[in-house]
Image (cartoon, coloured by chain):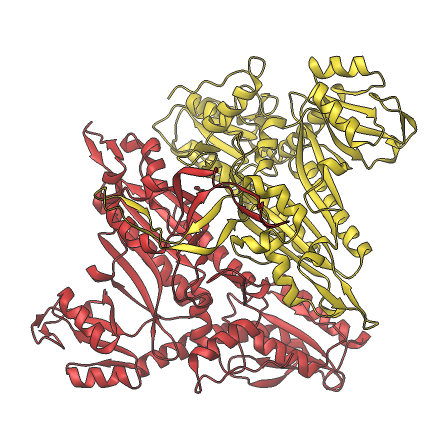
Chain colours: A red, B yellow
Amino acid sequence: MAKVITPRSEDYSQWYNDLVYQSGLADQSAVRGCMVIKPHGYALWENMRDVLDRKFKETGHVNAYFPLFVPKSLFEAEEKNAEGFAKECAIVTHYRLKADPNKKGKLMVDPEARLEEELIVRPTSEAIIWNTYRDWIHSYRDLPILINQWANVVRWEMRTRPFLRTAEFLWQEGHTAHATAQDAIEESLKMHEVYTRFAEDYMAMPVIKGAKTANERFAGAEETYTIEAMMQDGKALQAGTSHYLGQNFAKAFEVKYLTDQNKEEYVYATSWGVSTRLIGALVMTHSDDDGLILPPKLAPIQVAVVPIPKPSPEIDAVGDKIVAELRSKGIRVIYDRDERNRPGFKFAEYELKGVPVRIGIGARDLEKGVVEIARRDTKEKQSIDLNSAVMETMNLLDQIQNNLFNKAKDLRESKTKYLDDWNSFEEYMKEEGGFVYAHWDGSPETEDLIKEKTKATIRCIPMDEAFKESGKCILSGKPSTGRVLLAKAY
Amino acid sequence: MAKVITPRSEDYSQWYNDLVYQSGLADQSAVRGCMVIKPHGYALWENMRDVLDRKFKETGHVNAYFPLFVPKSLFEAEEKNAEGFAKECAIVTHYRLKADPNKKGKLMVDPEARLEEELIVRPTSEAIIWNTYRDWIHSYRDLPILINQWANVVRWEMRTRPFLRTAEFLWQEGHTAHATAQDAIEESLKMHEVYTRFAEDYMAMPVIKGAKTANERFAGAEETYTIEAMMQDGKALQAGTSHYLGQNFAKAFEVKYLTDQNKEEYVYATSWGVSTRLIGALVMTHSDDDGLILPPKLAPIQVAVVPIPKPSPEIDAVGDKIVAELRSKGIRVIYDRDERNRPGFKFAEYELKGVPVRIGIGARDLEKGVVEIARRDTKEKQSIDLNSAVMETMNLLDQIQNNLFNKAKDLRESKTKYLDDWNSFEEYMKEEGGFVYAHWDGSPETEDLIKEKTKATIRCIPMDEAFKESGKCILSGKPSTGRVLLAKAY
């Protein structure tokens, strides 16, 4: 049961895998590229989901559920979208197994149970949803439709990593329909902002808001807005995207409405999603060589109270009181009565699992009227007067949340450069790596060439006005109207 | 937009379909046997899920997530389970589409992207989960494992009906592992009781608790506990099952543990599940010819406040106050400001959607200091003093919840018979139909014969001790040790 986590400095990628598996977030499965989300990981996802779901509902959305399968003829209706996902689709072709006559006790696919039309396991649901919206939308009175879905999707990726890239993943996908382009663009920007606030205020993960280049847009979108976060190794991670789809899906699925002028028009669409990938982002943003570090707002357990060395009537009385008070303030807290393990073992476990605050209650400390409060992020410990333990814990949770955000932001700033010279850029990407704001001439050819030479990609065209300045493309030297964000990415 | 619902007396089955589609619970989809769960239906499911999830957590369970796909070799490992589900499996055989050379713009399954091993879309997750538990369980210290999963599953049913029987459905499936048979049996009985309390206390749907006969057990189970509800047409609906699986899956997947005596033993298992089928049960238990009737504890909207004939400063002031007070008491309430529709239209909509209580605020009523409160279940209306409107509404929600349960229970009693004579039984099943408690000799042959002759099946062997009495089998005349519950079923 010895849990060894490879240090980040030695192998960042291995550190991540070790941490995900050993902290109980996920496990490997018997299915290629699919993971098991273990209880600790799922509890984290539930907390993320609950916050996002509340934000979606506050912005007027409702949830619904559409089929897992997309008939091939619908899947191919929006050609760009189909082309974008065709190479990574799981396809259902049969609907029955039968006893294998050649192998006793074994089954085989029944060749007589072949589907007339193959079914694609949804890699995203625009096709099946827009095929349904056609029946729901007739007049401008039916608009907007503001629907979100929590679901599993499948993309048959060749190289997978837990949470970051898995064949099956959990996500939410919003699919909205609007009367005008402006309404749809506003919706996609609104949800982009919802994702930004979630990433920064809950995940304590600073993000850069921007638009994707044409090359990097969602297949079938007119515009893709993204939030890009920096991981501790300087690489970028796309954490959420919101797409303005124009009339592409409305045209592919013939979704029209009568305007208040009694004119027939195609509907405008958006879609937007975040996934269990965010768990990977969270891990890579904050954690250290000893285990997970989770922001208090999302941690499944926010406070663990540990009797030292073990439960006793005096210690339990104090522990129960602290737990009750914290719980009444809405804190997710546990009192660890388990006598099979010593405090040191428990401390290491809570460290590994990223519990933000640990309160140790020892018999000797109690005589002095104090308890020991330890924070996971800085590992600082302090003796606190028993009477202020709850207040101090509450303060500490706030401080940790803020500290994690600031620390991540400081790291990002320390690894961000404004470069105007190709050689410096190439060298930075080859060695340390990080975010670079540089001028780009706006052509897909230059974009491809940059990627080919450095493996860095244009993460986004930042929305911040500060980057809109004229200059010369870092590679081609041609004129540019603004700096773009470049980095290697997950 | 004229919404016509076939009356129950005319065609019960058509009434159900009309109601499900017209009340906005679900819609048909382009995928055979799969439905779209519309926002109203999904909101109902969310409320059911939230209550159940809380009950699962209160009884010590945690959530996790396992892969959608089951490799065929794992699927067939537990032979009875595999045999039970083989005939209704969606099977993934390929992982890529490519451009169809013969049809421009169309796609085809890429024959070169055939999976080495076919993947079954999970019809239930015992196989994939027990294959994982093997790695998680080593010693008695690792037990029990108490995990639940919220997921979609697929069973390729030939005849489908919205919610009641769909190719894809949403459900929860608990999968637990225990050191002893007794622990596992206790767990399965505990969850059986959780389902019972949920059905009766939240869905207001009385149920009969019992065990399935060997014929009707879950494939791979040693014992299946069921709750059986009566629908308004006298047919039974199996609303939830909890299975004691013995060591069947542990043996199929080689899941052993070291006891505290250092002896190697196979693990004992349970599984238990309820699904979106419960929405169908809810509809068929309470609703009437005018629309849904939903129990207040689960209704997405519990109270609708309607200004009559339309919003005005005076009416809005009263409406806002009532809404704020109800909301502060945790009631899901809306104030309907929409001026495009007249009150009569709104009343019909809320009736159709099953909103338990409607409060009408009219200008003339306000002069008299009263509002009109209408309940959906009995359609009674009363003028209530403005000052007691909130209290009266709260009382009414309780009364409706209780009334629905009692009404359903009365109906069930009126359609339940104790029969000892075959001809009466055959006739009752042919004509009116309902629940019958009758003696059965315990043989699968007699069970099959009863089904063949009457279409009625043994729904369960009731747990209630009152039914354990000696008698003679209603069909064979052979000795019996107790009455079983017989009915035609959904």
x, y percentage for residue B62? 63, 58
B39 shown above or below A169: above
Task: Name the residue: 57% across, 74% down.
Answer: A22
x, y percentage for residue B312? 38, 31
A51 shown above or below A431: above
Total numbered badges shown on the rendered structure: 0
- Locate residue B336 relative to residue B472 in the image: left or right: left
Asked whether the viewer can see residue B65, the reply is: yes
Asked whether the viewer can see residue A145, the reply is: no
B416 shown above or below A305: above
Task: Name the residue: 56% across, 12% down.
Answer: B10
Q: Locate the C terminus of chain A by quadrant.
A: bottom left
In-front residue for pair A309/B446:
B446
x, y percentage for residue B285? 63, 27
Q: Residue furthest right?
A: B470
Q: Locate the N terminus of chain A by quadrant.
A: bottom right
- Locate residue B227 relative to residue A377 in the image: left or right: right
Q: Residue furthest left?
A: A478
- Locate residue B435 relative to residue A426 in the image: left or right: right
- Locate residue A348 relative to residue B358 in the image: left or right: right
Task: Name the residue: 41% across, 74% down.
Answer: A405
In-front residue for pair A427/A175:
A427
In-front residue for pair B14/B44:
B14
Quadrant assignment, res B38: top left
Quadrant assignment, res B104: top left
B49 shown above or below B10: below
x, y percentage for residue B341? 37, 26
